[in-house]
Image (spheres, rainbow, N blue to C red):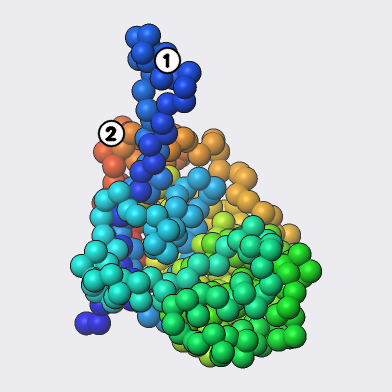
Amino acid sequence: MTPPMLELRGVSKRFVKRLDLAGRIARALGSPVREETVHAVDGVDLQVREGEVVGLVGESGCGKSTLARVVAGLHAPSAGEVRWHGQRLQDLDAAARQAARLQVQMIFQDPFASLNPRLRVAELVGEAPVVHGLVSRAQRDDWVGEQLRRVGLDPTLADRFPHQFSGGQRARVGIARALAVKPRFLICDEAVAALDVSIQAQVLNLFMELRESLGLTYLFISHDLGVVRHLCDRVVIMYLGRVVESAPATAFFDQPLHPYAQALLAEVPRLEARKKDFLAITGEIPSPLDPPSGCHFHPRCPHATERCRQEAPQLKEVEPGRWSACHLQG
Ligand code: SF4
């Protein structure tokens, strides 16, 4: 069987919160204060097949953006491995690793923050393909024009700076910049969350047109299950650094299995009154500095038992193609 395009095996990402000066002095004076570790991503297994659109969903702070950055190569994993077409990235030589990295591009929520305000669009979109030898400097402007046309912008706008565009146009510039290095895999990190609903729909349609015309694969990160339902083939739910459910989108929206996923879905408002975030699951998401024992969801779960407080459930295939990490499912 062909290996997945992207595979994560047991990927974790930890961040150590260093002591500030006051903390270091307190420790020197005998205080028990110590550095803290944030387990942003905790042993995640994930597969994405070529051509799939996978929606990665969870509340703020669940680790989905950190996971996206690991996939994009912006963070090195603290443990586990990332495979590209079946090959471990760390086994590739530098040139092959760079080529694999280039095929995975990330589109950010706030294009204004991710676009250098001092550069014109021609440079923002055209520099990376020149630097990586995908086009010559002489071909740059034609290449930029092609990318702008592809995302629905007039190529004559290449002389402008980011602040001269509307929010929707800036989002398109961000997409053009990602496309300019001929990626095969796009990670969209809340890529439409900051846009008005009507502009969101246009940009989502653009993603789907690009999927069709360029054969792209997507990891689509969102807190908005309405958007995920519209767009994705498969849904992966994260809670406090761990994957708790993975399922084909149709089956998931018919009947989510994990209690957290059920609670999320129960909160999805009607599309016409879509809210910006999850609100009504009882209790706050716990701190990743001090996650609950056993199943991380147990303090908020209506079905929690003593076993849940003590033993972390493993992610298991409970039906063909459906995975859940909950003691209720065995
Ligand atoms: Fe709830 Fe227990 Fe399942 Fe966790 S393992 S989701 S606490 S029933």
Q: Quick one: 288 or 179, which is closer to the camera?
A: 179
Total labels: the figure holds: 2
Name the disc covering residue 25, or none.
1
Residue 2 lies, in percent from the top left, at: 25, 82
Residue 255 lies, in percent from the top left, at: 46, 63
Q: CA distance from mark 2 to mark 1?
A: 36 Å
Amino acid type, label 2: Gln
- The residue carrying pointer 2 sits among few (fewer than 14), some (14 to 19) or many (20 or more) residues within 10 Å by Cα, namely few
Q: Is residue 128 left or right of residue 245?
A: right
- The residue carrying pointer 1 sits among few (fewer than 14), some (14 to 19) or many (20 or more) residues within 10 Å by Cα, namely few
SS at circle 1:
helix
From where the camera sits, is residue 225 visible? no
Q: Would you say the beta carbon of the disc 1 residue lies within 8 angstroms of ligand 1?
A: no
SS at circle 2:
helix
Amino acid type, label 1: Ile
Q: Nearer the viewer, mark 2 or mark 1?
A: 1
Q: Earlier in the sequence, mark 2 or mark 1?
A: 1
Answer with the quarter of the image where residue 173 lies: bottom right
Residue 301 lies, in percent from the top left, at: 44, 40
Q: Is residue 242 above or below residue 282?
A: below
From where the camera sits, is residue 224 visible? yes
Q: Is residue 256 above or below residue 120?
A: above
| Residue depicted at 72% across the width and 67% down the height | 162
The residue wearing badge 2 is 310
